[in-house]
Image (cartoon, rainbow, N blue to C red):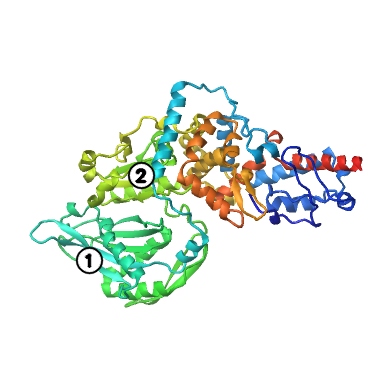
Amino acid sequence: MWSPQDRKYNHPPAQVSLKPGSQTLRSGNWSERKSHRLPRLPKRHSHDDMLLLAQLSLPSSPSSLNEDSLSTTSELLSSRRARRIPKLVQRINSIYNAKRGKKRLKKLSMSSIETSSLRDENSESESDSDDRFKAHTQRLVHIQSMLKRAPSYRTLELELLEWQERELFEYFVVVSLKKKPSRNTYLPEVSYQFPKLDRPTKQMREAEERLKAIPQFCFPDAKDWLPVSEYSSETFSFMLTGEDGSRRFGYCRRLLPSGKGPRLPEVYCVISRLGCFGLFSKVLDEVERRRGISAALVYPFMRSLMESPFPAPGKTIKVKTFLPGAGNEVLELRRPMDSRLEHVDFECLFTCLSVRQLIRIFASLLLERRVIFVADKLSTLSSCSHAVVALLYPFSWQHTFIPVLPASMIDIVCCPTPFLVGLLSSSLPKLKELPVEEALMVNLGSDRFIRQMDDEDTLLPRKLQAALEQALERKSELISQDSDSDSDDECNTLNGLVSEVFIRFFVETVGHYSLFLTQSEKGERAFQREAFRKSVASKSIRRFLEVFMESQMFAGFIQDRELRKCRAKGLFEQRVEQYLEELPDTEQSGMNKFLRGLGNKMKFLHKKN
């Protein structure tokens, strides 16, 4: 819920309040009532809409708020919003609308919102079988018991963001394979490191511990290697999660060093707190180029990079470097405005998985289950793991996330808490021998489940799942349709379409959350959980929410909104605003109803006095 101060009026507002039970309008004295000033209501319309209303010169007298002016205002706002929504998004929304039906939210009153006294009644013709109810109860108990064992991570707040942006990267390492004494196998070791950790501080000791783990992530398949003469370079990434929930990204380039004859590959790895895969891929390109000439050329380049200021979103920095034979050069590094999908490749998901299998995996992650990916290549594991996590936006996976799990750490899959990990196919025999608790094991090479819980098709609301499936099956058709704006061009890519399809799923299920964030006199915000859930008309969505609301993903999302001093920004919030504006009058939305209701109340006060 956005702060009332976000809305500006030409006159200071009168003291108007709604009693929880009566819906009556209170006003102080005659001079206040006579001015007919607008109340300070929660913001429900965009800044552009408010400017448009000002341009329409709406009458200040409530008696002149007639049906014609209200109708004209509503029509103009509706056409303005329609132009603002990309056509691809409108096509996706139409699929959901056709599958879902007309009714979305129950008709709410202020009293029902504040007291949470909403009846949990069935408004659909869905069967309420004993088996379905039993399965729902079991899922609810399961997620509650599992999360009691899981560590609680704090949400990503402004202090952490500021810390992350102090430096472009923490360190750069080269990892090589060294032969074990008296054995024909190899161990990964750090052969080069920048900067050197020579200060015995607590932070340096923690960094040393992380450095010990990095080689295993750079060569999770170290035991399978022998010298080779040819090898196509491979780019992948991994993530290290600290005990406090902090995360660091490892951006890796594996390739054969220059030379002749059979030799072992090495990995260049940049460790950073920031998720900008494209930016660091460009850094690795330059490192690879210099390493091919001489290893001595890498150090001055990384030093210049570390001394460079980190670019703000959408901005570019220029790194000046020198290369023998080429002279002075300038490398431009641009940070994307929105890096949410910058390191994501949804094409890999659809290459490895059918739409139905993908939705089953998505449903399992939403309920924070254990998921294991198995594939032949590091790049496949890395790409698919990052892509499937991106489907959860605006929520964040709060548990163990290891896109490529080293074979030496395979025992992690016996952990009783939620996780998403990737394993190379060479580790599959060992995986099958371990006493793994209930988990979804996915073979990305054959598009089949190695192990499952057999209820993956029933986890999501039935109608929304059908909409998800239809929109994804028609992805090529939806993208190829004509567009007529720049915003459409931004969406008309596979990444843009897939992101919008899953965002719409969350808009349909939790898009009304802001209506149930109440603010105390001290300015503290609190979320009305039961009122939020029971306000949904669909029984299947209410049941889904009952389980999903127990997850740490949902808890972190709401906590972030409760702690923010200003409204959240991002694509999801834009779609939520558009969704709330779409709601018909019977569902407590629309400028038309707002103005009509306000006008009627002010007319009543006129007559009474």
Element under disc 1: loop
Q: Nearer the viewer, residue 240 or 261?
A: 240
Q: Which residue is at 51% across, 65% downward?
A: 312
Counting every numbered tag in the picture gives 2
Q: Could you tell me how far apart the alpha carbons at marks 1 and 2 are, in whole angstroms?
A: 44 Å
Front tag of 1 and 2: 2
Q: Quadrant of the C terminus?
A: top right
| Crowd around label 2: few <14 · some 14–19 · many ≥20 (10 Å) | many
Q: Quadrant of residue 324?
A: bottom left
Q: Which residue is mark 2?
A: 417
Q: Which residue is at 46% across, 43% downward?
A: 551
**In the shown orientation, is residue 434 left or right of residue 500?**
left
**In the shown orientation, is residue 369 left or right of residue 198?**
right
Image location (x, y in percent) of residue 391: 45, 45
**In the shown orientation, is residue 361 left or right of residue 297?**
right
Q: Quadrant of residue 449?
A: top left
| Crowd around label 1: few <14 · some 14–19 · many ≥20 (10 Å) | few
Q: Give amino acid for label 1.
A: Ser
Image location (x, y in percent) of residue 236: 33, 55
Image location (x, y in percent) of residue 498: 48, 43
Is residue 15 visible to the viewer in this orientation of the structure?
A: yes
Q: Nearer the viewer, residue 313 or 196?
A: 196
Q: Are marks 1 and 2 in contact (CB under 8 Å)?
A: no
Image location (x, y in percent) of residue 224: 18, 51
Q: Give amino acid for label 2.
A: Thr
Q: Which residue is mark 1?
A: 258
